[in-house]
Image (cartoon, rainbow, N blue to C red):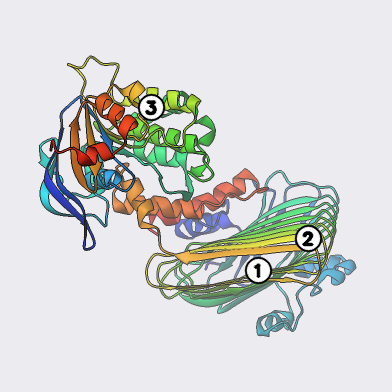
Amino acid sequence: MPEDIEQMADLSPAEQERLTQTGLEVEMKNRSGSFFQVDQEIRQVASLEKGIEVLSIRDALQKYDWLEEFSWKLVPKDKDKYTKYVADQPDPRGFVIIARKGSRTVYPLQTCLFLAKTSVQHVHNIIIAEEGAELHLISGCASASYTKTGSHIGVSEFYVGKGARITSTMIHNWGEEISVFPRSATKIEENGVFLSNYVCMQPVRKIQMSPFADLAGKNSVARFSSIVVCTPGSFMDLGSVARLSSEGATAELLTRAITTGGTIISRGMIEGTTGHTRGHIECKGLILRDGTIHAIPEIKGDVVDTELSHEAAVGKIARDEIEYLMSRGLDEDVATSTIIRGFLDVKIAGLPQSLQNQIDAAIDSAEKSGF
Amino acid sequence: MLEIKDIQVKIGEREVLRDINLHIKEGETHVLMGPNGSGKTTLLRTIMGFAGLEVTSGQILFKGKDVTHMPIHERAKLGMGMLFQRPPTIAGLKLGKLLAVTSGERAGMVSEYTRYLHMDNFMDRAINLGFSGGEIKRSEVLQLMVQQPDFVMLDEPESGVDLENITLIGNAIARLLEKDVHIVNRKKSGLVITHTGYILDYLDADFGHVMCDGVFRCHGNPREILRVIKTSGYKECLACQKI
């Protein structure tokens, strides 16, 4: 990786293409800001919209004393060996994004974490949407085409203020020998909305994550959506946890998982600790070639008047669906891929169209390569 | 158009159709009647080539080609089409997306057919998910209009459809079968399963067949057959020794 890479546009066309597949705009068109980190080097920090501040975590902690109240408060430093590793770093990397009270981004803000030659990339991110703010993030995480091994450890803490809204869309494009350990947690205040979308269509050695959301404010909403394809040799342990701790809170955890030979563990946990709350987990898995999908949906109600439900289904494409499309003139392969594309076609309510388009594009790209 | 020569069909070890002979010429519409479970849908599925149905002897010729063991999509490409009585629900696959994939050179006609069948609001909906009986049939007819098969098999097109929709669906099927074209110039052929006969008000069928227990028990004028069945039930057909 040459040292004169200051922005994404300085990367080679091949690397730019890998980032484009994660939904990033290399030319920064239609983006409200950007954070670009290569290995442990922060190359670009930019905010283009009033009311939105983007800083490296080091600069942010120096600039704002109050930020200490937000650092390592949702994700415990000693949660596991990965969080401990990040917490022990004397010179932390990562970003802080602050959407000031009432601010609204027209365009999404993009963050790019690019693994090139370091063995371990670590980041600690804090994202704050103050009261009434609306912030849309797209995070593209990728490794360079020539990077064969490495690990990425990312700690993210999201704070959704009263009546605020954060959408976080993360599209991964790692390599076959890269291991990834995101650790994230979110606190949602009254009438706040948090939408978290995760897409991984490309090979990876191991991903393990289970983001947590505390729906602490009245009528708060959290929705986690994961769309993944697990190739041979990949191991994905994916989950999300929501705690409904205030009246009127609702959470939905949705997964569409396909294995073409890899192993997927799809966890989901919703705990209703307060009345007048609702939660639903939906996990649907397709086994296209011998591999494993292990769905583990959990619901736990602690009080009267919390409504929790789950549904999980794992299997193959129904023969009658394939033959139905064949009777319309599609050959078996096209019929199958048409059904798979439909299976993955999740429309996320409340997500800006531009970000939905990025998710669709990532899936389209996988469809073209035959999943 | 379609010639079935003495086919026997098994599902697993069980013989479900036997001694089936049928000849449908270009421009003709035939009607297939019979009690529930008599093998009517099985015959249509056999002609279309669905899995699980084994043709153990005999031949299916379509436009002069032996299609007895041809894959489903190749039969469709040759010009066969089918309206399903109970089509599957395909979660996530939008009706509009399917029409886009199947329309090919008729892409420009999709919006006209969609409007004609009042399906404009269904393009972004998953196929058959939450559709009413009438909506399912309108979706099926729409897919066939986009496909424009030369030979159309219709499995109970009127079942589950209200009176208002049956007029719409009946007229659309008549259009599919070129009933507005003079019989001399009509190219499209059809095979229709019906229990009620309501659809015959729109189709002006040429021949009728009665199937019981996997064999044909009667061939003749469709209106006449329907009248007998309505009056005396299928026991008359079972007692009949004409064939």
Q: Amino acid at mark 1?
A: Ser
Q: Amino acid at mark 2?
A: Thr
Query: In the displayed image of the protein, which residue is found farthest to the top?
Result: B182
| Image location of residue A251, percent across then percent down | 71, 60
| Image location of residue B114, percent across then percent down | 45, 28
What residue is at 35 percent from the left and 22 percent from the top? B202
How packed is label 2: few (under 14 Cα within 10 Å), some, or many (20 or more)? Answer: many
In the picture, which quadrant includes the N terminus of chain B? Answer: top left
- What label sits on residue B198 in the rendered view? 3
- What label sits on residue A277 in the rendered view? 2
Asked if badge 3 and badge 1 are on a common chain, one would say no
Asked if badge 3 and badge 2 are on a common chain, one would say no
From the viewer's perspective, tell me whether residue A205 is left or right of residue B36: right
What residue is at 66 percent from the left and 61 percent from the top? A280
How packed is label 1: few (under 14 Cα within 10 Å), some, or many (20 or more)? Answer: many
Give whichever of discs 2 and 1 has the lower sequence position. Answer: 1
In the picture, which quadrant includes the C terminus of chain B? Answer: top left
The chain identifier of the residue carrying mark 1 reads A
3 or 2: mark nearer the eye: 3
Q: Amino acid at mark 3?
A: Tyr
Alpha carbons under labels 2 and 1: distance apart: 18 Å
Q: Nearer the viewer, residue A225 or B112?
A: B112
- What label sits on residue A240 in the rendered view? 1
What residue is at 73 percent from the left and 77 percent from the top? A91
